[in-house]
Amino acid sequence: MDNLSNSDKHHGLGYHPSPSSGDRLDRSITETTGYSTLSGDSFRNCRTNSETSSFSEPADDNSCSDEPSPLRWPITKPVTSHHDDFTSLGMKQDIKVVDETNNDEVVINSELEMMKERFSKLLLGEDMSGSGKGVCTAVAISNAITNLYATVFGHNLRLEPLPPEKKSMWRREMDCLLSVCDYIVEFSPCQNHQDGKSVEVMTSRPRSDISINLPALQKLDAMLLDILESFQEAEFWYVDQGNLPLITNPSGSFQSVIHQKKDKWWLPVPCVPPGGLSEHSRKQLQHKHDCANQMHKAAMAINSSILTEMEVSEIYIAALPKSGRAGLGDAIYRCICTSNEFSPDYLLDCLNITSEHEALEIANRVEASMHIWRRKVGMGHSKSSWEMVKDLMDDVDKSHILAGRAETLLLCLKQRYPELSQTTLDTYKIQYNKDVGQSILESYSRVLEGLAFNIVAWIEDVLDADKSMKHQD
Amino acid sequence: MDNLSNSDKHHGLGYHPSPSSGDRLDRSITETTGYSTLSGDSFRNCRTNSETSSFSEPADDNSCSDEPSPLRWPITKPVTSHHDDFTSLGMKQDIKVVDETNNDEVVINSELEMMKERFSKLLLGEDMSGSGKGVCTAVAISNAITNLYATVFGHNLRLEPLPPEKKSMWRREMDCLLSVCDYIVEFSPCQNHQDGKSVEVMTSRPRSDISINLPALQKLDAMLLDILESFQEAEFWYVDQGNLPLITNPSGSFQSVIHQKKDKWWLPVPCVPPGGLSEHSRKQLQHKHDCANQMHKAAMAINSSILTEMEVSEIYIAALPKSGRAGLGDAIYRCICTSNEFSPDYLLDCLNITSEHEALEIANRVEASMHIWRRKVGMGHSKSSWEMVKDLMDDVDKSHILAGRAETLLLCLKQRYPELSQTTLDTYKIQYNKDVGQSILESYSRVLEGLAFNIVAWIEDVLDADKSMKHQD
């Protein structure tokens, strides 16, 4: 992935420079089928025209219309006029008439028209040629949620309430996207009492994964926005680092803050009054930090549980190396294989991993080998020639053990690097997912995880500024 | 196809018993991917609860919920409750709050909720499990339009205005389905004048097939409804044939009418006053008949032009017989092949076709052979070995001629049987179509064709009743 545009995106997203979270959103976006262009745009756009939704927004970016890429949303402007063409040609006469006569109707119709636009674009699967060569619904909705998040929160680089218009956009459009879940059901037998005797009938009910996770995510969503809302009047304030020379307010904490902020130059600098924050607001801040931290953990847990449930794409399977050993590399393979007592932590220590990037690369290899061995175990049962059963069983047992060890190793790795970004397998799962319910839960939990992560990071920045100020005194 | 449910559908659709038009809708419905259940239902349903849309209607039919078929719409009822579950779980709090506070908002929200339901079901592609195993958007929209037509017009078996609630449902839901077209565009270069010099930029504009055909179809739609509307106060009236014994009104025309109506027992009997219709209203009726007839021709022309443009499914190609001769059968093949002067009309005379069904069967065979020969011509160019070029060219020329003759034969056949129902190729095209624009144009023109056909037939019935009455005097 092109690192420039990559880091570019972090900034647009107001991400803590930890590669992880930035990558987390990046990868899932840029590696989603035919999505890179779109996401790239929307991220750049969300720095320029932040008041429009990601659904319709890149449409307003005229630069889009120079390229006939069907993967963008270069539609609103052209289509509005097109829409007018149709009206003049006799389309939507009824609505138009109503528009002129009744004011409430106007409101209704504008809302309806907006909704139609959003859903229509989802139905076209981002292929505005209408030829049905776009992405499937699941991917389209996942992309829409990711883009909406970038549009609404992309500018929000500080602890302050979300602008009302953005807040309402977030609510309105998420509500629109989530509404699809209301119609996803599973069937189950249930006892039905009819004139005395009970009969068993099949009834439909919300799909369990949705009815469990969606309300939880919506609570998290609301709570995170409340935290931002709570910074209406704070004892601290922000200064853009670009404007530093112009700063007149001689906050004592300044130099030290600049110093510690060299590594995240795109973030505004939190400043605290001389003498630091009051005990009360410091305690409050600490409390909010802990809450946001819990919410981050919760969102992360839901996201990984959904990812675990998602189907492993055939393309990933096909791309797997021949053997688990080949995938893993001899060094790690020997450690995993030979020693009778397998200690994943000891192995990780030996590997002395230096960067998150390295950790991710190892995680990908371990995950691949794990799947190779699991498949071996699975396929073992399908064979049936008697003379080879014995060695086969040994083979299966060995694969079983290796798969188990790979799994624990992967787990340890993820525990050591909690912000580790999505593995190749995860991105494949998102890219080739067909399940609409899972796509909504995965993308919703992913963006909330990102938001929670940012809030935690921003609070820490303020606390640091406060600490260094107290030190100075 | 099961003939019972088949004819059943005709009646539900209020079709003239000519197999053609009935079949026309039937085939396209029952042979659309995984559609038979749904369509079957919706047709039965539209006889029971006619006030609900086909989108949501079978949902209200509890019988649906005993079977976990993902191809139905067994959702509204369950999901409403499910929706409530979610609300109680904290979903859509904002909307709920608004509902209680503001009345206009209630209107807006109910409209929005309806729209969300419709679009969500389209997005799920009729697979309410959300697992993405449903039909593609193109097929889902085509099915939705076919079902909406059956729900709104399925009961309308006589010349009378459409009930207002059905009229508004038709407008509202078609508007909702057609709105997808507003976002289907094609890109084209256009001269753009910037500070003096002109630059060529790509701009998007409505896809030409849509901008040409959709407004035309919407005009036809409006005009057909106007014709029905014009029968507010007519000189004739209807009597259900079931109620005949109970009839007290001794209309002289009665016996004769019954007589001529044995073959369409499910249609109400048009009755005219003793002495027949007034000259004025007879003329008016004749005029409306001619208009409706023109509209029927127009809708049919658009439908067949869209069908011609639709891609030939690989599955159809794969199912073609080895040779054009085999497909056509020796008898016809000899006529098409040997005679130097080929006269399709003479050939058709020789075949003395007795039924529409037979005509359709021959049309299918001719169409299949035509495609086999066309493919031969096409493939001819791809070959390149020199020594075989000569015989190859002969072969290609022969295939070319045969394909041409088959085409003219098919044309003549369709001219002789203007109400011939869809050929196998057409149903394959509809079933495997991925193009959303074409699916909307095809289904919209198909249902309008059906409506126009019925209006023409019903007017003819009244004119016949009038004629026979005049004869009696």
Image (cartoon, coloured by chain):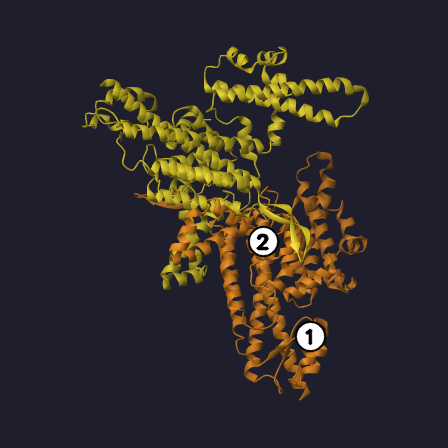
Chain colours: A orange, B yellow
| Outermost front residue | B196
Q: First in sequence: mark 2 or mark 1?
A: 2
Q: Quadrant of the C terminus of chain B?
A: top left
Chain ID at mark 1: A
Q: Quadrant of residue A107?
A: bottom left
Residue A383 relative to residue A443: left or right: right
Crowd band around label 1 with a 10 angstrom C-alpha radius: few (<14), some (14–19), many (20+): few
Image spot of residue B336 (x, y percent)? 60, 14
Image spot of residue B18 (x, y percent)? 41, 24
Q: Is residue B275 visible?
A: yes
Q: Which residue is mark 1?
A: A242
Residue A331 relative to residue A19: left or right: right
Verify CB contact (< 8 Å) between mark 2 and mark 1.
Answer: no
| Outermost bottom residue | A473
Q: Nearer the viewer, mark 2 or mark 1?
A: 1
Residue pictured at 57% horizontal, 34% vertical: B310
Chain ID at mark 2: A
Residue A400, above or below B349: below
How many numbered discs? 2
What amino acid is labelled 2 in the image? Ser
Cα distance in 3D space between marks 2 and 1:
35 Å
Q: Secondary structure at mark 1?
A: helix
Q: Which residue is mark 2?
A: A142
Residue B163, above or below B92: above
Q: Is residue A185 visible?
A: no
What amino acid is labelled 1 in the image? Gly
